[in-house]
């Protein structure tokens, strides 16, 4: 599974556009959408002026491992990094990866992760800092039911059985990209925010996944 696009709703497109441009992303507006380019993926913010409460999500963006320190320093010069137990980064030994985190104006928890086992096809392009979306949250109060629906389309949990009260890394195929399936009120790492369920659209190289009001709709692309 490759995550090609994720789509959120927002009522603050100008602020989001300015923010992502300031930290080095290429952005463009098409009709009612702001599109953030991530080389192999896109983050799409769809304008909804009637939105009462700003939705927020966790997503991860892969960056080249050899450029981690430079990219982190560059972003840290512009905005404040998030802190967890007095640290502004974390090393995940089980996947041999380092990450740092920020909040964007919409309240999203954005992770920049350098995976030392990243496929060369993602890092062979020179002068590209932001490679792809590798993780996107899907928060639901029906974790097992949602996973069983995903399982019908060939999705699986990366390491374990599904944990109703845990964070589940859902994937398909051999690509290291994941839907983070979890329930509400679980604290996100490097944040004081608790997970909440909001509508989301995820497009992979295989499926279009729409989630809203605890209902999941999956459409095959091919």
Image: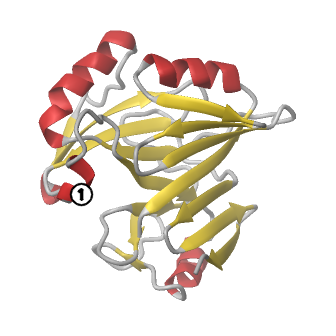
Horizontal and vertical percent position of residue 59: 45, 46
> Quadrant where the N terminus lies?
bottom left
Quadrant in which residue 120 is drawn:
bottom left
Q: Residue at x 49, y 50 (%)?
A: 186
Q: Residue at x 23, y 18 (%)?
A: 73
Horizontal and vertical percent position of residue 15: 63, 19
Quadrant in which residue 28 is drawn:
top right
Q: How many marks?
A: 1
In the visual, does 108 lie left or right of 211? left
Name above or below for residue 15 compared with residue 26. Answer: above
> Quadrant where the C terminus lies?
bottom right
Question: Which residue of the protein is positioned furthest toward the bottom in this rendering?
Answer: 152
Question: Which residue of the protein is positioned furthest toward the top in this rendering?
Answer: 77
Name above or below for residue 51 compared with residue 92. Answer: above
One can see residue 166 in this view: no
Name above or below for residue 20 compared with residue 187. Answer: above
Q: Residue at x 25, y 32 (%)?
A: 127
Horizontal and vertical percent position of residue 151: 50, 84
One can see residue 124 in this view: yes
Name above or below for residue 82 compared with residue 175. Answer: above
Colour theme: secondary structure
Quadrant in which residue 210 is drawn:
bottom right
- The crowding category of the residue bearing disc 1, from other C-alpha atoms within 10 Å (few below 14, some 14 to 19, many at least 20), is few
For label 1, the SS is: helix
Horizontal and vertical percent position of residue 78: 38, 12
Q: Name the foreground residue: 102 vs 32.
A: 32
Q: Which residue is mark 1?
A: 121
């Amino acid at each position: 599974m490759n995550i090609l696009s994720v789509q959120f709703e927002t009522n603050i497109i100008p602020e989001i556009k300015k923010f992502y441009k300031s930290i080095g992303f290429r952005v463009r507006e098409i009709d009612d959408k702001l599109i953030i380019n991530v080389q192999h993926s896109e983050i799409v913010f769809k304008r909804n002026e009637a939105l009462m409460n700003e939705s927020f999500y966790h997503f991860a963006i892969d960056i080249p491992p050899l450029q981690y320190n430079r990219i982190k320093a560059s972003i840290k010069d512009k905005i404040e990094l998030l802190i967890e137990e007095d640290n502004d980064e974390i090393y995940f030994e089980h996947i041999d990866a380092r990450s740092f985190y920020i909040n964007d104006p919409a309240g999203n928890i954005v992770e920049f992760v350098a995976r030392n086992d990243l496929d060369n096809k993602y890092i062979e392009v020179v002068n590209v800092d932001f490679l792809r979306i590798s993780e996107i949250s899907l928060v639901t109060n029906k974790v097992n039911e949602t996973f069983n629906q995903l399982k019908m389309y060939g999705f699986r949990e990366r390491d374990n059985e599904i944990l109703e009260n845990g964070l589940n890394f859902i994937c398909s195929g051999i690509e290291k990209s994941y839907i983070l399936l979890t329930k509400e009120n679980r604290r996100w790492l490097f944040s004081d925010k608790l997970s909440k369920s909001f509508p989301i659209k995820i497009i992979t190289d295989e499926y279009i996944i729409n989630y809203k009001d605890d209902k999941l709709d999956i459409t095959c692309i091919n």
